[in-house]
Image (tube, rainbow, N blue to C red):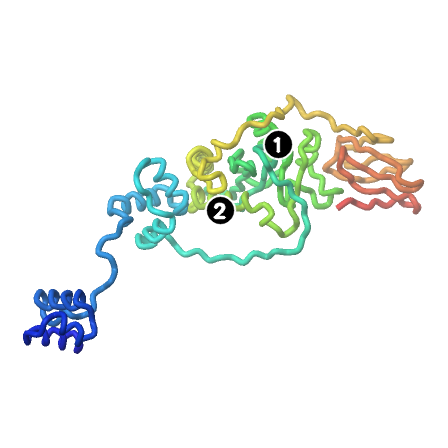
Amino acid sequence: MESRKHAIDLVELGISVSEASQLAGVSRQCLHKWLARYREQGWKGLRDHSRAPKRHAFAVTKRMRQRVVAMKKRFPSEGPRKLRGYLETKYPGERIPAASTMSIILKEAGLVAPRRRRRTNLASTKTTLTTPTAPNDVWCIDYKGEFLVDGRHCYPLTATDLFSKFDLVTRAHSGAVTTPTMRCMWNAFGTYGMPAVIRSDNGMPFISPKSPAGMSRFSVMLTRLGIRHERIAMGRPDQNGSHERFHRSLKAATANPPAGSWSAQQRRFDRYRKHYNHVRCHEALEMRPPANVFCNSSRTRPSKLPPIQHPRAQRILKIYSNGEMSLRGFTLFLSHSLRGETVAANEVEEDLVSISYGAIHLGVFSFRTKKPTFTQAP
C-alpha cells in the first residue's frame, strides 16, 4: 500500500506517469489502473481485489439447480450420475451439470447424507465363477434380509440377470422356504425362459448343508432342468456384489420405512421393479435401463419337470421317501433332498462305489468294513 500511495503522490505532484512508474518499479498499465481506482474509490481502492472471475462460462443457473433438487426429491435413493441421466432424458439439448457439480448442489441443499465406507474382507478363497457375455448367461438369486411389515417378518426373494441387471423377481415371502422359492422361480422360467447358470449363496433354501454336495430340493429342480447351480464361496458376498448392490437400492426405495401392510409392500416392490427395469439408467449399461439390454432366453421351460438322466450309470438306484436306498444288500441313508429321485452308482474299485446325481458327484460308499461308510462330496 505504501509503494502504491507513493506512486500516486508522484503523479499528483506533476511527475509523468512514465517516470512515476519507473520510480515505483511497475508498468505504466499498472499505475494507470491504480490511478483509476484511487480517483473512483479513494485510498481503499488501492487494496488487493479478488482475482476470481465475475462471471463463469459454465455456471449452473438457478433454474437448473431447482431441477436438480426436484429430481433428487423425486428419486431420493438415486445418486448424481443417475439423476444426471434422468435430466438428460427430460431436458434434451440443455447443458446438464456434471455429476460432481450435482453432488455439490445436493450437499448444499442438505439432501445427501455422508455414508460410512465399509472395509471389505478379501479372503483368499479360490472360486471359479461364470462371467456372463449375454443376457441369461447367469441369473443371481438371493433373499433380502428380513424386516417387519405389519408385525410379520418379510423376506423378499429377488432374482436378477447378471449381464443386463434386469430385475426378474422381487416377491415378498414370509420366510426363506423351499416350496415358495421353487414355485416363484418356476413361474419366472415360464415368463423369461431358462438361464444357463443360477448363482446363489450357501444359505437355505438354495443348498442343504447336511446333504451330499449341498444338494437341496431347489438344486434338484435346477439340475433336472439342465441349469447349473453355481455357489459363491462361504463368507464372500462380494462374489455376488452386483446383486447385493441391487438389494441396497431396493431397501432404500421400498423398505425405509416399510409399508403398512403386506399387499402395500408388494405393490411397492412392483412399482420399483417397473422403475428399475424401464426407467432407472445403469452405469454398467452406458446409462441405459436394463429393459433396453435384456431379452428372453431361447431355452424355454418345459410344461413339467423332466426326469434326471444318468447316461453313464452302471446301476440306477431309487431313493426312498425317507432318503434311504438299497445297495449291495444294505439299506443306506443318502439325503432327504433326493427323496423320490434316482442316482447313478458306479464301481470305482472292488469295495468303493461312487454315487452321482446327473453330472453332480455326491460321494463314495466304502464297503471295506462291516458297516459301509459314506464320504460326501463337498
Q: Secondary structure at mark 1?
A: loop
Question: Is residue 171 in sight in this rendering?
Answer: no
Where does label 2 land, which residue?
248
Tell me which residue sits at (5%, 74%) in the image.
14
> Which disc, if any, is residue 344?
none
Residue 189 image offset from top left, x and y in percent: 59, 28
What amino acid is labelled 1 in the image? Pro
Disc 1 designates what residue? 195
The amino acid at mark 2 is Arg
Screen quadrant of the N terminus: bottom left
Q: Is 35 left, or right, of 53 in this rendering?
A: left
Mark 2 and mark 1: Cα distance apart in space: 24 Å
Residue 161 found in image quarter: top right
Viewer-side residue, 156 vs 222:
222
Q: Residues within 10 Å of mark 1 (few under 14, many from 20)?
A: many
Mark closer to the observer (2, 1): 1
Q: Secondary structure at mark 2?
A: helix
Q: Position of residue 329 (x, y in %)?
A: 91, 36
- The image position of residue 231, as x and y in percent, is 66, 43
